[in-house]
Amino acid sequence: MSQTIRASDISLHDLKTQFGLQLNRDKPFFQEWQTEDPDLTDFEKPFLDRMKDDYFNLLEYPPLLEDTIKMAILGPLLHLAGFYSYPFQTKSEYSVKISTVDGEMVVEGKIDVLVLKDRFWIMVIESKQAAYSIEAGLAQILAYMLANENQDKLCYGMITTGGSFVFIKLVKGKMPQYALSKVFELRNPGNDLYTVLEILKQLGQVALTKS
């Protein structure tokens, strides 16, 4: 009899032992996120500066929940990156399921936002204990990405708490592999939203060219 567990309860160890998932630490494996000079417009930069100010204003009135992060941070980023325009498609609360080859384990769950025809996954976490939350959400989003029906194609993901962002690349096959970007933080000097938006734009273009 198969065992069904929630994606939110899955661990990286489970994904490694049950699905063969491996972390690839080679820098060339995930070059798409490595941008040195964000190519943003004169409109986008002040807009992102205002978004950063708004985020810290929201933090003064806790709790900062998922829906607020989606409205104040994620929605504007997806709009600026062009993910609401054709040929992209956006779905929310998307149900996914993945099972081992022998059917002994089935993982089920729902993801907050899915864009680009199952090729780009975004997960939003409430802004509480941000560093821990991103780590806790990593296995969950990887399980969702593994459930992608396009077995022979790569896909990308992003986890955000509103103030922290990390990007993920997954390449499927007989031995699926994933890699992570560095974590971008709004508490860093300057404005990491500049780089986050440029990476979103780049990954969107890569995913389209590889469709």
Image: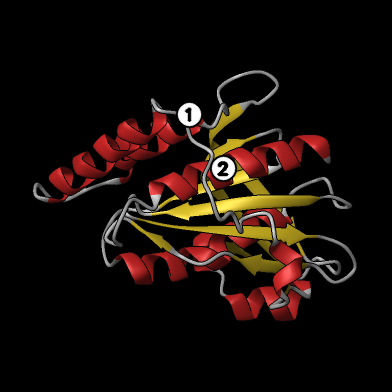
> Can you say whether 172 is above or below 196 in the image?
below
* Left or right of residue 117, residue 56 in this image: left
Q: Quick one: label 1, few (<14), some, or many (20+) residues within 10 Å?
A: some
State which quadrant residue 36 falls in.
bottom right
Q: How many marks?
A: 2
**Kind of residue at disc 2:** Leu
**Residue drawn at point x = 9 percent, y = 46 percent:** 61
Residue 161 at least partly seen: yes
Q: What is the x, y in percent for residue 185? A: 35, 60
Q: Secondary structure at mark 1?
A: helix
Residue 154: percent from left, percent from top: 78, 52
Q: Badge 2 is on which residue?
A: 200
Q: Residue at x 70, y 37 (%)?
A: 205
Q: Residue at x 28, y 39 (%)?
A: 49
Q: Residue furthest top?
A: 86
Element marked by disc 2 = helix
Question: Mark 2 near mark 1, Cβ–Cβ under 8 Å?
Answer: yes
Q: Earlier in the sequence, mark 2 or mark 1?
A: 1
Label ID, residue 90: none
Kind of residue indicated by mark 1: Leu
- Residue 14, position as x, y percentages in the image: 64, 77
Q: Is residue 69 left or right of residue 94?
A: left
Q: Position of residue 62 (x, y in %)?
A: 13, 50
- Between the residue at mark 2 and the residue at mark 1, the CA separation in whole angstroms equals 9 Å
Question: How many other residues sit within 10 Å of disc 2, few (<14), some (14-19) or many (≥20)?
Answer: many
> Which residue is tagged 1?
80
Residue placed most toward the observer, 147 or 99: 147
Image quarter in which the C terminus is found: top right
Q: Quadrant of the N terminus?
A: bottom right
78 to 16, vertically: above or below: above
Residue situated in front as seen by the camera: 201 or 1: 201
